């Protein structure tokens, strides 16, 4: 498995869709996902990725400090950090308070009808989220990710899935929220892969490390063998570099030394195992590469603020 796919899988994303909006020009709104938006789908996640799917029409979107983007029909735009943002037909307009929502059927999809009566745009709005503190993938994502509309059968499948599930949700079919949440997760993964493919060569960070032949191999080795007793020397030898050259290049591209990166990913892996399985803490500690349960407990508490057994119980209770 390549490290990007491994990282995306480790995110353990869930989510849902909560709003169907019919908007007509001129219009401009402030937007972000609130705890109230997430609450009907279960516990509010620690990390929230907000998204908008443009079913018809087009809109402009801008996060403070970033250039505006135009989102066309059939495109989905994701905000990995759930920054407050403007959406509208014209972002120079003062943001308005939207008209009252049309209350949904129990468990259904809320609707918003708003605007000045001109050119129409229809949006579906939702979120993705997880409970991994300091999620390393989300931490390096840009404020806005836009996935251009695919063509052909894929585009038709995405559009029909959104429309079908949205129609069922509007009538109280809560099960479709999970369908759309999964679709949004798949689209998020695709957006990250495309972001990596189109990232400038000058860009630094973990994703840039994946594109470097030597560092990409090192990252793959670490992800496939978290339990191995790695050292910087051993990892450098595996990919045929000197220790100093490898450590310098890894740190330059990824942003942290190899063993610090490994320690972080071991904890991310352990947190996922604690959430997904009922395995004993001692076994998870071993799988994650810790020599003893006591050492794992100390490292986990430093990172998450709570020992692993207590953290697992808190997550289950929440």
Image: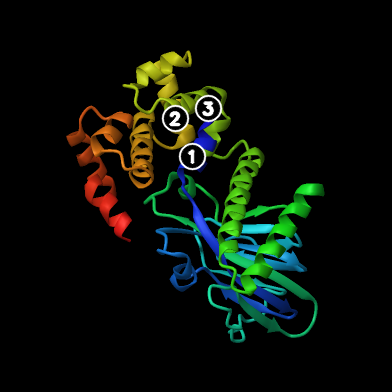
Q: Secondary structure at mark 2?
A: helix
Residue 124 visible within the image: yes
Measured in 3D between alpha carbons, the distance from the residue under mark 1 to the one under mark 2, in whole angstroms, is 9 Å
> Residue 102 — which label?
none
Judge from the rendering whether residue 284 lies leftward or rightward of residue 194; answer left or right: left
The tag earlier along the polypeptide, 1 or 2, is 1
Can you identify the residue that label 1 sits on?
7
Characterize the local packing of mark 1: few (<14), some (14-19) or many (20 or more) Cα atoms within 10 angstroms.
some
Q: Is residue 257 above or below residue 318?
A: above
The tag earlier along the polypeptide, 3 or 2, is 3
Q: Nearer the viewer, residue 308 or 263?
A: 308
Characterize the local packing of mark 2: few (<14), some (14-19) or many (20 or more) Cα atoms within 10 angstroms.
many
The picture quadrant where one finds residue 43 is: bottom left
Measured in 3D between alpha carbons, the distance from the residue under mark 3 to the one under mark 2, in whole angstroms, is 11 Å
CB contact under 8 Å: marks 1 and 2: yes
Judge from the rendering whether residue 55 lies leftward or rightward of residue 243; answer left or right: right
Q: Nearer the viewer, residue 292 or 148?
A: 292
Q: Secondary structure at mark 1?
A: helix
> Residue 216 — which label?
3
Mark in front: 1 vs 3: 1
Q: Position of residue 147 (x, y in %)?
A: 68, 52
Judge from the rendering whether residue 162 lies leftward or rightward of residue 135; answer left or right: right
Q: Position of residue 264 (x, y in %)?
A: 35, 38
Can you identify the residue that label 2 sits on?
223
Q: Secondary structure at mark 3?
A: helix
Mark in front: 3 vs 2: 2
Query: Measuring 42% from the left and 13% from the top, which residue is drawn there?
Result: 237
Q: Is residue 73 above or below residue 278?
A: below
Characterize the local packing of mark 3: few (<14), some (14-19) or many (20 or more) Cα atoms within 10 angstroms.
many
If the image is split into quadrants, where does the C terminus sit? bottom left
């Amino acid at each position: 498995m390549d490290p990007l796919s491994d990282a995306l899988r480790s995110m353990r994303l869930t989510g849902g869709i909560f709003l169907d909006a019919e908007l007509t020009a001129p219009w401009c709104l402030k937007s972000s996902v609130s705890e109230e938006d997430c609450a009907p789908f279960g516990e509010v996640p620690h990390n929230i990725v907000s998204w908008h799917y443009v079913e018809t029409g087009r809109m402009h979107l801008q996060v403070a400090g970033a250039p505006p983007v135009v989102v066309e029909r059939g495109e989905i735009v994701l905000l990995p950090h759930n920054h407050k943002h403007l959406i509208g037909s014209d972002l120079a307009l003062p943001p308005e308070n939207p008209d009252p929502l049309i209350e949904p059927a129990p468990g259904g999809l809320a609707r918003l009808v708003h605007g000045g009566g001109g050119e129409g745009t229809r949006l579906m709005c939702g979120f993705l989220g997880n409970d991994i503190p300091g999620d390393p993938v989300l931490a390096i994502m840009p404020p806005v990710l836009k996935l251009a509309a695919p063509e052909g059968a894929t585009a038709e499948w995405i559009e029909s899935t959104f429309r079908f599930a949205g129609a069922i949700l509007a009538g109280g079919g809560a099960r479709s929220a999970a369908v759309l949440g999964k679709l949004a997760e798949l689209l998020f993964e695709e957006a990250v892969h495309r972001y990596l493919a189109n990232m400038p060569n000058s860009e630094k960070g973990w994703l840039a490390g994946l594109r470097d032949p030597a560092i990409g191999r090192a990252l793959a080795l670490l992800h496939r063998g978290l339990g191995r007793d790695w050292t910087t020397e051993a990892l450098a030898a595996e990919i045929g570099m000197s220790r100093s050259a490898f450590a310098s290049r890894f740190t330059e591209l990824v942003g942290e030394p190899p063993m610090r990166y490994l320690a972080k990913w071991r904890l991310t892996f352990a947190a996922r195992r604690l959430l997904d399985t009922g395995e004993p803490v001692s076994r998870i500690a071993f799988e994650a590469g810790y020599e003893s349960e006591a050492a794992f407990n100390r490292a986990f508490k430093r990172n998450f603020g709570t020992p692993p057994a207590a953290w697992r119980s808190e997550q289950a209770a929440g």
